[in-house]
Image (cartoon, rainbow, N blue to C red):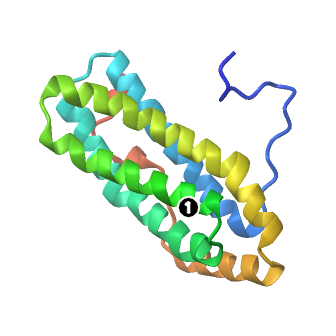
Amino acid sequence: MDPNHISMNQKPIRRNEHLLQFSREHHFTLLFSWKIRRGLKNKVAMERIVNYVAFFWHQHLQPHFLAEEKMLFALVQDEMVQKAIREHLTIQEEVHEMANHSTSRVEKLLGQLADKVDNHVRFEERQLFPHLEKILSKEQLEKIGIQLKEQPAFSPAEEYSDIFWAC
């Protein structure tokens, strides 16, 4: 059985109301990984998928990472937070690396990126956020909620014009 699969008997994760926006953004980030995999499966031209990765990185993923690091990770300096920061850096490096490789190498990088992003989101949702909800004070969580409301809302990437994943 796939370790990332959630069975119908498994209860949904209850998230602190002040972190819900991050979790909503994680949903769209999981869709990002799915779209990459779908494009690879359907043999879509690598350039189309790479263009989408660049778009999603600049419009959504990079701002999301920066917000997490500024609002959440700056408050706690433990190993779980350090793991999340290292994963952010690895994902960033892979996104930038794609622009400098041949088509055959890019296909492998895209698959790796989809897996890394997927695993990272699941780590944050299943382990890191519950951990932070336990150790951050009510006041700290409320402050995060206020800061998130001041941020531009993370919208689904359906505004991207080339819906290669639907091929």
**Amino acid type of disc 1?**
Gln
Judged from the image, the secondary structure of the residue bearing numbered disc 1 is helix
- Left or right: residue 60 versus residue 146 is left
- Left or right: residue 82 versus residue 142 is left
Quadrant of the rendered image containing residue 148: bottom right
The picture places residue 132, in percent across and down from the top left corner, at 73, 64
Quadrant of the rendered image containing residue 43: top left
Q: Is residue 72 above or below residue 123?
A: below
For the point 57% across and 50% down, the residue is: 26
The picture places residue 100, in percent across and down from the top left corner, at 13, 42
For the point 62% across and 42% down, the residue is: 122
Neighbor class of circle 1 (other Cα within 10 Å; few <14, some 14-19, many 20+) is few
For the point 81% across and 78% down, the residue is: 137
Q: Is residue 92 above or below residue 122?
A: below
| Residue designated by label 1 | 82
Whether residue 166 is visible: no
Q: Is residue 142 above or below residue 39?
A: below
Q: Is residue 163 above or below residue 41?
A: below
Q: Residue furthest front?
A: 79
For the point 27% across and 34% down, the residue is: 49
- Left or right: residue 17 versus residue 155 is right
